[in-house]
Image (tube, rainbow, N blue to C red):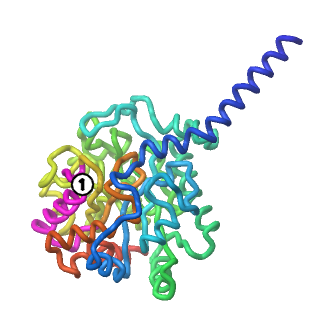
Amino acid sequence: MRKFKWLFITLGTLLALYLLAVLIVPKILDAKHNQTKVLPPYTVSNEALKLYNSLEFISDLHCDALLWRRDLTKKNEVGHVDLPRMQEANMALQAFTIVTKSPVGQNFSKNSSDAMDNITLLNIVQGKPISNWRSLFKRAEYQCQQLHEYAEDFDDDFIIVKDKTDFEELIEKRKVDRKVIGGFLGVEGGHCLEGNLENLDKLYNEGLRMLGPTHFFDNELGGSAHGITGEGLTDFGKQVVQRMNELGMFIDLAHSSPAIIDDILKMTDKPLIVSHTGVKGTMDNSRNLSDKHVKQIAKNGGLIGIAFFKGAISSPEIQGIVDAMKHVKNIAGIDCIALGSDYDGSVTTPFDITGLPLLVEELLAQKFTEDEIKAIMGENIKRFMLKNLR
């Protein structure tokens, strides 16, 4: 009897410690991994602020806020994005991208799919459902459902864009009330499908509209830009791309090996997205797009989201963001350039979402015209969505 008593005490103590960790640790991790160089409020010139406030449609192609245990319906002191800060920043549309696996020791050069996974531990310490602890698909499904819950809790001020009708509703409502904002769902890496094509349809039914074949490691679809094999699409990868085209889902080439990019460009004439990237023309590493691929994606009517973090862009960061945009403009034109921040993606950015006027100020400083700035800040995404959403 005494043994059972001590067992219950031990289990109770462990449970109490776990619950305490769930209450305390997630915010500490969030604050540690998602930092800004400069904290708000931000100061910009009157010229930049006037232009920024005149922008009708501001949009960003990449944000990992769903990864963290942060109530996105509240304004938070940590991280880069939540719904109130989207409203404050006059952000019309944000891509909420899902991370399901991240190797320990993650780097731009070489990562093994067998490496220990950071996201497993993060799910445990955040108190996520036990079903998430082992299943990559369940993690993706859960984060899709989270965004739907946030939309419900935010009343009618947040629209999840799943089709052209939703997007047109967002545009019309914002003509009357700029507090109305929208988001769409994407995922980093087809490993969340767990080798089962039916899981793509299941995630589509949960609202997922964008998928990148690979993230930081090779998977069942093919090679990562940071993996080991460098291979192109596997047979399963080709099946996924074909099914995405049938469903009207956007293919995100961020993190894909050059061979996968080549394969997909051969397989489809549909416009492609690179949700968050730099370019080799200003920062030459395996993370960033070659001039050849920049030109091909632009010619295909695609979007290239320029990221905000060191490694994608050169330092100093705000100037580096615009330097990358200028390089893309010079070799491929203005119509393919978009914001691809990688907010809340375990990166340090120059500013959080409310600091976007600083980017407008730097674009002005580097002699971009007002029409070009409007295109980069969101009109290119708006045009892409109106043309390609079903």
Image quadrant holding the N terminus, namely top right
Q: Residue 311's spot in the image, x, y percent?
A: 24, 46
Q: How many marks?
A: 1
- Image x and y of residue 155, in percent: 63, 73
Is residue 48 positioned above or below 240 on the image?
A: below
Check the image and report above or below for 80 versus 217: below
Which sits in the foreground, 359 or 298?
359
Residue 195 visible to the viewer? no
Residue indicated by mark 1: 317
* Picture quadrant of residue 369: bottom left
Q: Residue furthest top?
A: 2
Image coordinates for residue 82, horizontal then vertical, percent: 50, 61
Quarter the C terminus occupies: bottom left
Residue 320 magenta: yes
Vertical side of 4 occupied by 73: above or below: below
The residue sitting at 32% across, 60% down in the picture is: 340
- Amino acid beneath label 1: Glu
x%, y% of residue 309?
A: 29, 51
Of 320 and 316, nearer the camera is: 316
Direction from residue 342 to residue 83 in the image, left or right: right
Q: Horizontal placement of 135 versus 89: left or right?
A: right
Residue 38, picture quadrant: bottom left
> What is the span of residues highlighted in magenta in the rendered image?
312-338
**Hey, which quadrant is residue 95 in on the image?**
bottom left
Identified at 33% across, 51% down, the residue is: 37
Crowd band around label 1 with a 10 angstrom C-alpha radius: few (<14), some (14–19), many (20+): some
Q: For the point 59% across and 63% down, which residue is it?
A: 150
Q: Is residue 351 left or right of residue 209?
A: left
